[in-house]
Amino acid sequence: MSQSMLNFLFIGISFAVYVVITVRLRAGSTKEYYTAGGGVSSFANGMAGAGAMISGAK
């Protein structure tokens, strides 16, 4: 098998895995999309916000 064929095969498999993951883990509603289904605590949300502010302050 040539190098070109191996490259196309690897890229195709990678793309197929990406599509499968995307379809299987898709949010079912806007509530799940925007609030992670209510599974994120207020502390974790605050830490994420603080990290975003600190990283943007450089």
Image (cartoon, helix red, strand yellow):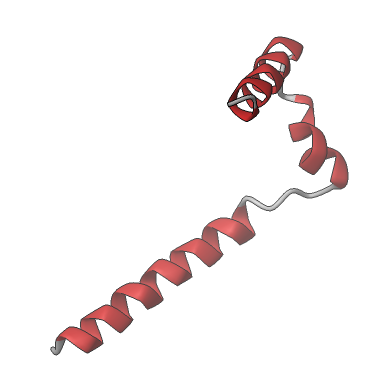
- Residue drawn at 46 percent across, 70 percent down: 16
Residue ranking furthest to the front:
58
Residue 38, compared with residue 33, is above or below; it is: above
- Residue drawn at 70 percent across, 10 percent down: 43
Residue 23, compared with residue 16, is above or below; it is: above
Q: Is residue 12 left or right of residue 51?
A: left
- Tell me how many marks there are: 0
- Residue drawn at 22 percent across, 81 percent down: 6
When asked about the image quadrant of residue 39, the answer is top right
Position of the C terminus, as image quadrant, is top right
Q: Is residue 55 left or right of residue 32?
A: left
- Residue drawn at 22 percent across, 87 percent down: 4
Q: Residue 11 at what x, y percent from top left?
A: 36, 74
Q: Residue 3 at what x, y percent from top left?
A: 16, 84
Residue 51, compared with residue 1, is above or below; it is: above
Report the front residue among 39 and 2.
2
Residue ranking furthest to the right:
30
When asked about the image quadrant of residue 21, the answer is bottom right
Q: Is residue 42 left or right of residue 12?
A: right
Residue ranking furthest to the top:
43
Position of the N terminus, as image quadrant, is bottom left
When asked about the image quadrant of residue 42, the answer is top right
Q: Residue 50 at what x, y percent from top left?
A: 68, 17
Report the front residue among 54 and 2.
54
Residue ranking furthest to the left:
1
Report the front residue among 3 and 18.
3
